[in-house]
Image (cartoon, grey):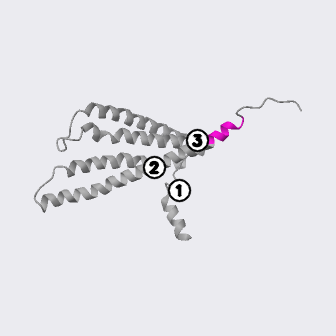
Amino acid sequence: MPNRPRQCGARRPAALVMPMKSLFLSVNDTLYRSCIWIAGLSILAMTLIIPWGIFARYVLGTGSSWPEPVSILLMVVFTFVGAAASYRAGAHMAVGMITDRLPPLQRQLVALLVQLLMIVVCVFMTYYGTRLCITTWNQSLASLPGVRVGMTYAPIPVGGVLTLVFVLEKLLLGDQSNRKVVRFDLVEENEGAA
């Protein structure tokens, strides 16, 4: 039997692809959980701060200047970070009336176009959000002098990058909205049935 040269890498690409895919999905699961926690804690803090501001103003008679701007900042964090998580979960509003009536090939092309447009939006948010942060970094908020204006705009580029990661995940690996980490309601239903 003649010695044939060993085919280097014949199996390696397939062997490397699965761990890389698993690693990418695992990192994105962690990013998704982080987005959910950050958005959830932001809205929780908002619901505690706003009543405190009302209580301090109308009951104690000492209006504080910090509850309103902090609540607005938390709403911006909730909006942009929560939007990224919402995108991965497939929870964004979509009007499928027209695309549902298209033939399968055209439906796939429209879905690809949507993802490409999402990339454009994410890059726009990231680029111009970063420029906005840099431009306004040396300014301070009047009601919170220790907080820089650029810091209040930081959720825009951060949300853009997070959403971009989830868009690329959807383009490369398909829809991940049915993953266990995303669909906790399915986990609860299965636990209740057991």
**Magenta span:** 10-17
Toward which corner of the image does residue 52 lie, by quadrant?
bottom left
Res 6 quadrant in image:
top right
Crowding near the residue tagged with mark 1, few <14, some 14–19, many ≥20 C-alpha atoms within 10 Å: few
SS assignment at label 2: helix
| Residue for point 45% across, 49% down | 32
Which of the marked residues, 2 or 1, is nearer the chain's N terminus? Answer: 2
Residue 32 numbered mark, or none: 2
Nearest the eye: 15 or 100: 15
Q: Is residue 49 magenta?
A: no
- Could you tell me how far apart the alpha carbons at marks 2 and 1 are, in whole angstroms? 12 Å
**Does 12 appear in magenta?**
yes
**Residue at 23% in and 32% down:** 138
- Which three-letter amino acid code belongs to the residue tagged 3? Met
The residue that disc 1 covers is 180
| Marker disc for residue 20 | 3
Give the overall secondary structure of the magenta segment. helix
Could you tell me which residue is drawn at 47 percent across and 41 percent down? 165
Residue 159 location, x and y as percent?
Answer: 38, 42
- Mark 3 or 1, nearer chain start: 3
133 up-or-down from 143: above or below: above
Q: Mark 1 is on which residue type?
A: Lys
Report if residue 111 is visible in the image.
no
Count neighbours of disc 2 (C-alpha within 10 A) and say few if under 14, some if 14 to 19, many if 20 or more.
Answer: many
**Amino acid at pointer 2:** Tyr
134 lies left or right of 115: left
Which image quadrant: the N terminus? top right
Q: Nearer the viewer, mark 3 or mark 1?
A: 3
Query: SS for tag 1?
Result: loop
Task: Tell me if residue 5 can be seen.
Answer: yes
